[in-house]
RNA sequence: GUGGCCGUAGCUCAGUCCGGUUAGAGCGCCAGGUUGUGGCCCUGGAGGUCGGGGGUUCAAGUCCCCUCGGUCACCCCA
């Protein structure tokens, strides 16, 4: 016998367990996103968590997300694989692989992984919801996609959200613009930090949204994308703006919004939560990625989409105070003063009839069982003891909302045979009275 | 990857500067008050390797070193 205790484990750095009530809020948020997306004709896609490393390498060779932050490893058969750091690459890979009818409008909800130092609103395992549309070039599609996210934020009650909008031009525009930006910063190397000089080599556009204050003036004087836009790119952007105006979706043009992943073309956008007092206040972002399908071996296909950070939206909702306490959904708690067989049978019957029911295991005094009933949040307690069994009845006690039940005494005896039908009837009444459930 | 702050009960935290009896509080949990009635109240109880390891000392939650973890910020991003 050794006195050593077994090792105690805890969740890995940057990974968290989501327990109730947080799990209930998360579930509610995702459900609302699903409803919003379905209402606009989007269908769910569920790509795998693990992809060939190349799927992600193709889309972000110049980004930290891909070069430094991926969970990558060699699989048992020697394949280089990675946990997805974002959703778009996998979805586009699926599009190229299955060649669905276009336009392909999909939504998703899932977990991504990035090996970063955690901080508020940033975790190594984080959930996103989002949509992608492949195979359509219409600027009104950009409008639909952006508005969809906007309506979703409205639906969950968020008010302090800002939509930032920009365009990066078409492929050639972006290349010429990038060169111009590079030469601008190259001429001001002395004013750049060492880290920024490295960024200049890899992806000069990224310098535009640097947060370093001392570099602000160099950034201010950098060339603007507007001067590099081809007529068709400018026209596309104008129509996107006009569409958002028509729908009453407010936005702010941010010419330094270049976004993190380097597959973006033309329209880019980002949503920030102004109530969030954290450095990570971007709650969502997206844009067009017209070249991505081709980069992944498919035919040239236009694409656009966005991803929203579930964790950050929940933080923003908390900051705005729009998160309600999740309510108990339990109809009945069964208190059994006999040997437990009554609770076993009655909960079974109630559940089969579509009601929610719980009970306490291992018995306990009536006081203890009633306390459990109260804590469960159940609307009713069904009490069964020797007296009830002898009378072929149960005691039905209302635990909450006594006041609004005039004529409905707090406690009454109900024939055992009528219990399920009586409760089923009341349950449907109450659900009609409560519009927001 | 870099830096600041913080690790004491399930949770929120006193106690650490200036080392010294059995390490405390509130909330929560359990039981009793009410031999079949929850919430409120009263009484009692359980619950702690003081993150871990090493060192200094007669004596360490308290001082020193290392380490692990958390948190916030930078970088970057949802």
Image (cartoon, helix red, strand yellow):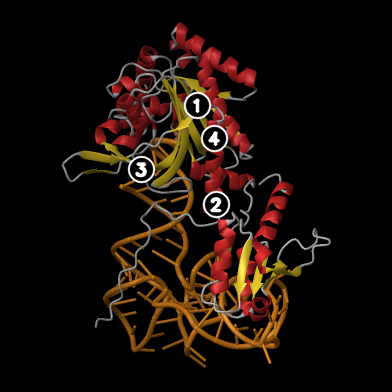
Mark number displayed over residue A272: 4
Q: CA distance from mark 1 to mark 4?
A: 10 Å
Residue pictured at 58% horizontal, 24% vertical: A252
Q: CA distance from mark 3 to mark 2?
A: 25 Å
Looking at the picture, how far across and down is residue A102, in whole percent?
A: 42, 19
Residue pictured at 48% horizontal, 23% vertical: A220
Quick one: SS at disc 2? helix
Task: Find residue A103 and report its image quarter.
Answer: top left
Tell me which chain the residue with mark 1 is part of: A
Residue pictured at 61% horizontal, 72% vertical: A335
Mark number displayed over residue A114: 3
Q: CA distance from mark 3 to mark 1?
A: 22 Å
* Vertical position of residue A316 compared to residue B66: above or below: above
* Vertical position of residue A297 compared to residue A429: above or below: above
Q: Is residue A129 visible?
A: yes
Q: Which residue corresponds to mark 1?
A: A269
Same chain shared by disc 2 and disc 1: yes
Task: Find residue A435 and report its image quarter.
Answer: top right
């Amino acid at each position: 016998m050794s006195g050593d205790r077994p090792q105690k484990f805890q969740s890995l750095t940057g990974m968290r367990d989501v327990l109730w009530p947080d799990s209930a809020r998360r579930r509610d948020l995702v459900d609302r996103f699903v409803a919003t997306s379905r209402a606009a004709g989007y269908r769910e896609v569920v790509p795998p968590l693990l992809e060939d490393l190349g799927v992600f390498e193709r889309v972000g060779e110049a980004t930290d997300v891909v070069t430094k932050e991926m969970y990558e490893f060699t699989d048992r058969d020697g394949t280089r694989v990675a946990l997805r750091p974002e959703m778009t690459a996998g979805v586009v890979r699926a599009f190229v692989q299955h060649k669905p009818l276009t336009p392909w409008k999909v939504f998703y909800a899932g977990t991504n992984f990035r090996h970063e130092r955690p901080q508020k609103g940033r975790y190594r395992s984080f959930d996103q919801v989002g949509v992608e549309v492949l195979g359509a070039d219409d600027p009104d599609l950009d409008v639909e996609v952006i508005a969809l996210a906007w309506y979703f934020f409205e639906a969950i009650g968020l008010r302090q959200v800002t939509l930032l909008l920009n365009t990066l031009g078409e492929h050639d525009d972006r290349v010429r613009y990038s060169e111009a930006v590079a030469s601008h910063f190259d001429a001001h190397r002395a004013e750049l930090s060492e880290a920024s000089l490295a960024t200049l080599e890899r992806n000069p556009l990224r310098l535009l949204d640097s947060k370093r204050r001392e570099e602000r003036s160099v950034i201010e004087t950098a060339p603007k994308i507007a001067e590099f836009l081809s007529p068709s790119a400018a026209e596309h952007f104008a129509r996107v703006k006009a569409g958002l105006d028509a729908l009453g979706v407010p936005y702010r043009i941010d010419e330094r919004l270049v976004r993190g992943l380097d597959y973006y073309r033309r329209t880019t956008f980002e949503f920030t939560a102004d109530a969030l007092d954290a450095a990570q206040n971007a709650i969502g972002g997206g844009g067009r990625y017209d070249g991505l399908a081709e980069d992944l071996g498919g035919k040239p296909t236009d694409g656009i989409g966005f991803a929203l950070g579930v964790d950050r939206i929940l933080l923003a909702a908390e900051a705005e105070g729009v998160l309600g306490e999740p309510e108990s959904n339990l109809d009945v708690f069964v208190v059994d003063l006999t040997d437990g067989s009554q609770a076993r049978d009655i909960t079974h019957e109630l559940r089969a009839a579509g009601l929610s029911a719980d009970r306490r295991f291992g018995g306990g005094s009536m006081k203890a069982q009633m306390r459990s009933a109260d804590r469960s949040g159940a609307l009713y307690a069904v009490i069964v003891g020797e007296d009830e069994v002898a009378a072929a009845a149960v005691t039905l006690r209302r635990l909450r909302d006594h006041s609004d039940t005039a004529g409905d005494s707090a406690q009454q005896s109900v024939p055992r045979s009528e219990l399920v039908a009586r409760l089923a009837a009341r349950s449907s009444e109450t659900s009609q009275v409560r519009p927001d459930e």
